[in-house]
Image: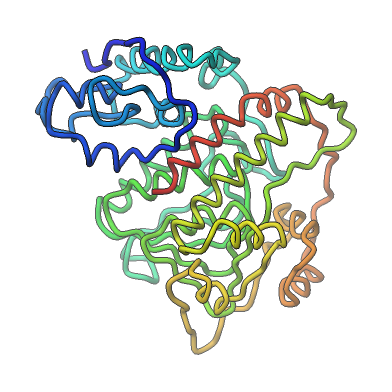
Amino acid sequence: MGAIRPHKTPVDTESDWDGPAEVAEAPNDADVLRYMHAWVDDEGDPDAKTSYKFPHHEAGTDTPANINAVNNALARLSQADIPDADRAGVEAHLRAHRRDAGLEDKVENIKPNTRQPIRCFEGNAKPYEPFWRIVNAENSETGEPEIELYGYISEYSWFDDDITPKMFKDDLYRTGGGGPVTIRLNSYGGDVIAASLMHTIIRDYPGRVTVQIDGIAASAATVVAVAGDVVRIQETGYFMVHDPSVVFLMAQLNIEDLTRMANALKAIKEGILNAYVSKTGLSRERLSRLMTEETWMDAQKALDLGFVDEIIHYEKPIPIQLPQGAAVVNALRNYSNLPTPIAQALENTNILPSESSALTEDMKHEAQVLYERVQNILKKGVR
């Protein structure tokens, strides 16, 4: 049986987790590897690290489980390439460590796909519908297979969505075939859960991934952008970072609701900072300040700060083009430091009417469980 039997153990709830480093330190020894992980490929080599998944202990046979690693493994379970028959056993193993740490909460009662996905942004997309477009190599401008991400990084939240992330992963692997692939990006943001999971999927892809920013990479879209092995931006493009936020009207909230939401936002920011630190090498303090100040960067500044690796120079630069009638540009109205070209483009764009955003019961529930899940999804999303 691939799922390793649960074992009671002390749980480290304080330390950060670096799974690749822990696995690298582990010896090629079946007893150590089995203890460190929650699943083993019974048809693989028992002494080979590639036969094991979901590490959550430091290297050894008597070390405590790390709660960050446990939560990360749970967040990735739905996307993992393991037999469906093993998932329940793996989940039971990881949940047992959470109980050992005294972390029994509503996360344990959530079952995948039992609720309609939550719409985050206005638009015409349907639940579980791809928001990306595949371009085969023979039809692409780069000569490589491409995935085009123009617009929202999902109109629907990927929270508790086990379907759409798998679709994106399958399309990436099928399109790239394990070789080079280019992601064309022109996005003003979206669902940070989706962005963080896409970051992880892109980083896990075995081939070289080039992210080419054709216009704007803003907000959550930047988390996707910095996942690329090489990040390019056209010379008239922009890159924008800012603090995560939530907008709602006419909602009755108590102190606990507000505290959970504040904690979730702090966790989201920490995860985004992990991604930016990994890409740029800048200090967390400086990056945090850039986010708080809502920093718009032209191509040269994004290159100078390390968010991108290369500027694409065209004989005739591509002007900023916002999608006509698209609700996504509504979000741009909320930013305070819009560059002049984008502000001018907005003046010529048809804006869909905004709807009031009340905090629904589903959204309250999401805020309650978001803190731990986002923290660990995003931490795994950067290495």
Could you tell whether 228 is left or right of 284 in the image? Answer: left
- The structure residue drawn at horizontal position 72% and vertical position 33%, both measured from the top left corner, is 261
Rendered position, 332 above or below 42: below
Image quarter in which the N terminus is found = top left
- The structure residue drawn at horizontal position 65% and vertical position 35%, both measured from the top left corner, is 264
Could you tell whether 4 is left or right of 172 in the image? Answer: left
**Picture quarter containing residue 302?**
bottom right
Q: Residue furthest bottom?
A: 315
Give x and y (percent) for residue 361: 75, 22
Give x and y (percent) for residue 245: 72, 45
- The structure residue drawn at horizontal position 28% and vertical position 25%, both measured from the top left corner, is 37
Rendered position, 9 above or below 198: above
Q: Nearer the viewer, residue 17 or 194?
A: 17
Give x and y (percent) for residue 16: 44, 38
Q: Nearer the viewer, residue 152 or 382?
A: 382
- The structure residue drawn at horizontal position 68% and vertical position 48%, both measured from the top left corner, is 244
**Picture quarter containing residue 166?**
top left
Give x and y (percent) for residue 236: 59, 78
Rendered position, 310 above or below 88: below
**Picture quarter containing residue 227?**
bottom left
Q: Nearer the viewer, residue 329 or 91?
A: 91
